[in-house]
Image (spheres, rainbow, N blue to C red):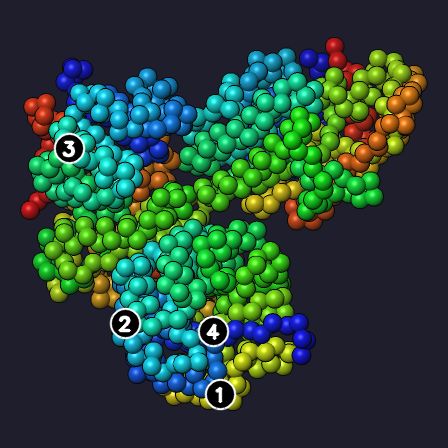
Amino acid sequence: MDVSRKLPVAILGTGNIGTDLLVKVLRSEVLECALFVGRNLQSTGMAKASSLGVRISDQSIDAFVRNPDCCKLVFDCTSARDHLVHWPILQKQGKIVIDLTPAKVGTMCVPAVNLQEGLQAQNVNMVTCGGQCSTPLAYAISQTLGKVEYIEVVSSIASRSAGPGTRINIDEYIETTQEALEKFTGCGRAKAILVLNPAQPCIDMQTTVFAKVANPDLPRLDAAVRAMVAKLQAYVPGYQLVIPPIYENGRIMVMVRVQGMGDYLPKYAGNLDIINCAAMAMAEEFARKLLGAPAPRDREGAA
Amino acid sequence: MDIRKQEITREDCATLFPNGPAALAGLRGETLLVTGGTGFVGTWLAELGAWLNDEHGFGLHMILLSRQESDFAGKAPHLAGRKDIRLLKMDVRNVQEFPPEVTLLVHAAGTPDNRFHATDPLSTMDIFVRGCRSVLNAAARLPALKRVLHLSSGLVCGGQPLDLPRMPESFAGRAEFGSVASCYTESKRMAETVCAGFRSQHRLPIVVARPFAFIGPYQLLDRPWAINNFVRDALLGGPIRIQGDGETVRSYLYGADLACWLYAMLLEGQIGHAYNVGSPEPVTLKDLADLIADQLSRRPKIERNLATASRFQATRFVPDVTLAESTLGLQRRFPLLAAIRRTIAWNQAQA
Amino acid sequence: MNPTTKPILICDVTLRDGSHAVAHQLTAAQMEVYARAAEKAGIGILEIGHGNGLGASSLQVGLAATDDRTLLRAVRPCLSRTRLGVFVIPGFATINHDLKPAIQDGADVVKVASHCTEADTTQRLIGFARESGKETFGVLMMSHMAPKETLLEESRKMQSYGAEGVILMDSAGAYLPEDVAEKVRFLVEHLSIPVGFHSHNNLGMAVANALEAARHGATILDGTARGFGAGAGNAPIEVMVGVLQKAGFATGVDLYGILDAVAVAEREVITTVPSIRGISLVSGLAGVFSGFAKHVERVAKEYAVDPRDVFFELGRRRAVAGQEDLIIDVAIELADKGGKNRGHP
């Protein structure tokens, strides 16, 4: 592909998430990293970006104020509090913002479910790692079996993949994930549970979706879940169905496991990888739209 | 390199395991990265790893990290050319990423040479503190990492009182601070705290080893430590010169024992524990000089530098290794006399 | 009695941990009647709720028959001397949805629990409970899985967040008395806040371990009426109180009072008195969360696999509290292998 036909993007936040995203952007056929922005030139992420020949800045949001034309799209990988400061500035500049923080300013988007809705927004929120993992399954259940009385998702992640931010913000994780589940299934009662497991070697992220439904039509659900898993695998290669839908003890249960791509973060950090993969899927779709390139395949949900 | 030297170190490896190396079976099929990989510790780990591969089919892959990786071929040519040993040129202070296949890590970088500490205390602190941080930061992103062994120093416990026969891990002695002379001990202490931080915050499975004093092949005889100088003086025909009255007490663990102990700590040590590594067999420098002199066919003279004796403060540095012996089942296979004999033989085999 | 011995705070968890034994089906009426008896007996803290605490009613662990608020409001008027306790695990419950309402409904004591290596998940909840003026303890679950040094570090985190005591939970019933001695003594020596112990009886050690903990300086001990709890159950509180009394510890609990309370529990609450059956023993040996017992039995039957194999495999995978979904994963895997997982110890 012609290099000039790539959408210039910037990554704001040079921690583990931002740096992993950088590796993914550098591999993209439709995105190019115009700027990698943080606060500390000495950070590991900055050193990595430099070694990859990426332009870096330690001016944080001021980098955009000084150089408003540097890019069309910004990934915000900082924190919810910082995003609230960044968004008005980026909004005025007309940037598309993909928000990986739990700030929930923009439209909550899970590419396998509501890609098209996301493309209409200027600020797209990527929910949570557990939300990216579980809502597509919950959505498939609600689309196939009709009314869902109650939906519950349990994610177990490797302790080592949960940084200080995740640990202190578990309540926000739970609330945001529940909100996304309710939005995408229309079910008024959703519960999210997060478990950290310190086993060594590290476990892969594992997510179980439970549902209480009036009509557990397993054969139909099985087909719908498998189709949804395939749709996710198009942008999250490590997403695997472990237990196809079963009906046990009065509940529907589906289990998936997510292994990361191992770009910058270790493979066991499937929870961090999936939100980055989802952000990439979103950004690439924006790029195709803005560059006028045809989408390689339709990823929109079945509804 | 003299073939006899290789025979000596391989015989040493065999001596370690009278009943076979089952205790180190956890190394089978693993990929080990050693920072400071071409130093005394790293070379011995490589020597033993190579022997386990050759004699027992361990299938251990070793990656030796070093700033001067090119020196290794001269120092250990039989190891440098092997397929199971890879050399990687990297300064620990600037480590960003390690090869993703690494499953075991030994952080042994940084010299204990106090001449370097005296001349360049800033780099010393940088290597031990920032180096440790960079290494563990990269380790925290290794996908298949099972365990980390951090090499600290017996000195972190502070000065050993003369009336304490052996210093246990829990001993808290007086430690100098705020002087150039304290830069090594203080940065080694800080590095242990950095390890605790990574263990707590990133759940890195880190075990700490606190080395005392060692002797054996690959030990450079120009190092400013009594035993090295005594062996060097003896090999040159003497006289062996003792600083002071010779009442200072040390103990020495042989290189092969050291490698075996470190592997056991890496594999079986309790996460978060620190283990002394060294010999509990005390010897005065006076007796050590005699012991070394006795090993040579033409016994060199021994001279005591009595001019400084009145001002020379005798010290003691002998570990209590009960913790390693009782919880990890470790034993020394080379008592001091054997260690000295092997060291002299290896150095005499020098071309 | 040794005058230097500190009194032991007895925490009765019959109406919380006991919930595991009846799939969280305890009713408000049952709780009320037992709470009155516990109050009469002079129990220090009475903890109530779902087995995994506030907000834990779920398909994962089990849906509770009665919601947290109804239970708290029912029990609150029954207690005056005895403090009303709640248990909460971050990841299951949140401040807004669960802890804040529980405090509004009159909880006096908040125990915030995490897996024994994950204490930094408790910062916000401990902080909130303290700011609300509630007596707050940290709980390290599955504490047999970490060495004493780690337990100390994690306890210190909880202490720094504001915990007024740290309780080691032997969630799997895997401790032997020497383990209790080693860990409790170490924490007591190094912490400036009280240390507690919560026993389970999988290896028949629950009371012995509670006594051992007291002898090494623990001043908070958990128990349940007749050991009512999942699997092999907990330390029978009446036996624990009697034994502590004999060993010279003050508990503030009236022996006849607690025996009467236990009689009430037997009549109104306890369906089956726990005993050490083969699979409970295996669960303790495998070091698996006691609360898994009922799920393992049900799932093993459904998939025609040996529940003992399920426990050992869960232990091998180092499952932690809250990972009940793994039970089905393991059972399916074992069933695929032909129902028998040979080669276990």
Q: Which amino acid does label 3 sit on?
A: Gln
Disc 3 to disc 4, C-alpha distance = 55 Å
- Using the image as rendered, state which of residue C99 and residue A26 is in the foreground: C99
Instruction: Kindly state the secondary structure of the residue where label 3 is placed.
Output: helix
- Circle 3 chain: A
* Residues flagged by tags 1 and 2 on a common chain: yes
- Circle 1 chain: C
Name the residue carrying label 2.
C69
Mark 2 or mark 4: name the one nearer the start of the chain: 4
Mark number, residue A91:
3
Q: Looking at the rendering, in which quadrant would you find the N terminus of chain B?
A: top right
Instruction: Kindly state the secondary structure of the residue where label 2 is placed.
Output: helix
Q: What residue type is labelled 2?
A: Arg
Mark number, residue C11:
4
* Residue B155 drawn at (x, y percent): 69, 35
| Dot 3 crowding, Cα within 10 Å, few <14, some 14–19, many 20+ | few
Mark 1 or mark 2: name the one nearer the start of the chain: 2
Disc 1 to disc 3, C-alpha distance = 68 Å
Q: Which of marks 3 and 4 is in front?
A: 3
- Circle 2 chain: C
Disc 3 to disc 2, C-alpha distance = 43 Å
State yes or no: discs 4 and 1 in contact (Cβ < 8 Å).
Answer: no
Q: Looking at the rendering, in which quadrant would you find the C terminus of chain B?
A: top right
Q: What residue type is labelled 1?
A: Gly
In screen coordinates, is C120 left or right of B212? left
| Dot 1 crowding, Cα within 10 Å, few <14, some 14–19, many 20+ | some
State yes or no: discs 1 and 3 in contact (Cβ < 8 Å).
Answer: no
- Circle 4 chain: C
* Residue C336 drawn at (x, y percent): 33, 54
